[in-house]
Image (tube, rainbow, N blue to C red):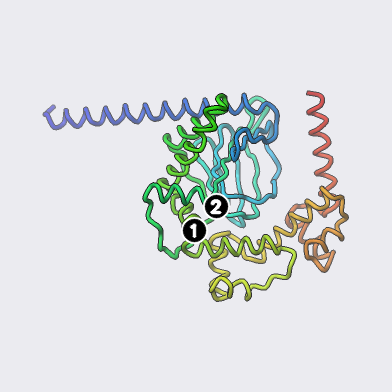
């Protein structure tokens, strides 16, 4: 073996050793994250142990849950989950993270969970102002790109980002330290996200650049006025776009048309009204902007799988069973 071959072998060995150390560190962090979440949340449900940091636990796979996403970093310590945005599907697990940057109606489902191995996850809410502050401090360049950026995506969770997440969770044991250190570690997490695969996703929101910002404004407008008739021409004009351009960019970011977006918001709100305020289906339909109750019933069944009142009764029965199980335990 000549000197060059020997030197190359030594370098390869050192690289292999470094890779193994990083893999071992990442696995140790995943194990620690799972244990700390398990110690903090002992019953199924969701808690917020630190401001903006949420833990979720589930002892069984879930049905499809309709909700609205918020700008957040999401990671899983055990189990797996799928998120649907329009026709796009995003599945992630302890090796991956999900990043969401715009408030959108989504469908999510826990895929892997059991009593022996519950589903554990965390969500860190992201303040666009804080993201912008970290960008400025890091000297991160403002993007002038006009490209559209999807509002949700999944990427591998690398060792350095995972390490910062674990250090944030450790602070639950030290409230006095958390007061000082939690904001610093949150900034580190944002920094590592900015430097990672999904940096563009955060940057486009934070710097208010590209079409993504205009679509974010349109989303906010639609969320605020979801029960009003949809006037695409007016919204497109406010955004400085043609109607066809607005449709194209809206779907590029949200994976659905403005009409589909409004429809999901209306139906989710109607479901909330029937569950939380005991409204009948017709009253809920009119409250969210439907003029035709039969049309509402058809669209509701198409989205949730069953007619309105049957769906609501099913949800109430499931809630009663969950409460009964919690009392027995």
Residue 88 pos. (x, y %):
57, 54
In the rendered view, does 250 fall on the left or right side of 297? Answer: left
Along the line of sight, the residue nearer the viewer: 318 or 133: 133
Disc 1, SS: loop
Q: Looking at the figure, which quarter contains the N terminus?
A: top left
Q: Residue at x 66, y 51 (%)?
A: 68
In the drawing, what numbered circle is on residue 160? none
Q: Position of residue 40 (x, y in %)?
A: 63, 27
Residue at 77%, 57% in the rendered image: 300
Q: Judge whether 295 appears above or below 66 on screen.
A: below
> Quick check: 132 above or below 4?
below
- Which of the labelled discs sits on residue 149, or is there none? 1
Q: Position of residue 133 (x, y in %)?
A: 46, 49
In the picture of the structure, the residue carrying the numbered disc 2 is 101
Please state which of residues 319 and 89 is positioned toward the viewer in this rendering: 319
Q: Earlier in the sequence, mark 2 or mark 1?
A: 2
In what quadrant of the picture does the C terminus appear? top right
Of the pair 134 and 272, the residue shown nearer to us: 134
Q: Alpha-carbon neighbours of circle 1 within 10 Å: few (<14), some, or many (≥20)?
A: many
Q: Residue at x 48, y 36 (%)?
A: 185
Vertically, is 180 above or below 277? above
Dots 2, 1 in contact, CB < 8 A: yes
């Amino acid at each position: 073996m000549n000197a060059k071959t020997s030197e190359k072998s030594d370098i390869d060995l050192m690289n292999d050793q470094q890779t193994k150390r990083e893999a071992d560190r990442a696995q140790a962090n995943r194990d620690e994250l799972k244990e700390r979440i398990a110690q903090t949340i002992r019953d199924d449900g969701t808690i917020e142990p630190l401001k903006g940091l949420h833990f979720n636990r589930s002892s069984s796979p879930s049905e499809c849950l309709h909700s609205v996403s918020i700008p957040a970093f999401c990671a899983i310590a055990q189990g797996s989950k799928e998120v649907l945005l329009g026709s796009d599907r995003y599945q992630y697990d302890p090796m991956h993270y999900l990043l969401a940057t715009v408030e959108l109606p989504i469908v999510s489902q826990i895929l892997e969970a059991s009593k022996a191995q519950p589903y554990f996850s965390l969500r860190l809410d992201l303040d666009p102002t804080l993201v912008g502050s970290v960008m400025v401090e890091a000297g991160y360049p403002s993007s002038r790109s006009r490209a559209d950026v999807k509002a949700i995506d999944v990427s591998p969770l690398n060792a350095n980002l995972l390490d910062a997440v674990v250090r944030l969770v450790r602070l639950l044991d030290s409230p006095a330290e958390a007061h000082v250190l939690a904001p610093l570690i949150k900034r580190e997490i944002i920094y590592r996200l900015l430097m990672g695969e999904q940096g563009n996703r955060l940057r486009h929101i934070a710097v208010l650049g590209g079409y993504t910002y205009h679509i974010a404004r349109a989303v906010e407008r639609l969320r605020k006025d979801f029960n009003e008739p949809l006037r695409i021409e007016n919204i497109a004009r406010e955004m400085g776009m043609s109607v066809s351009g607005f449709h194209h960019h809206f779907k590029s970011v949200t994976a659905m048309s403005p009409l589909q977006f409004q429809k999901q918001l209306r139906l989710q709100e109607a479901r909330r009204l029937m569950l939380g305020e005991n409204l009948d289906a017709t009253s809920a339909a009119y409250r969210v902007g439907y003029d035709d109750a039969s049309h509402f019933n058809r669209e509701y069944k198409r989205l949730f799988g069953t007619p309105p009142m049957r769906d609501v009764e099913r949800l109430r029965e499931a809630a009663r069973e969950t409460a009964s199980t919690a009392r027995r335990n």
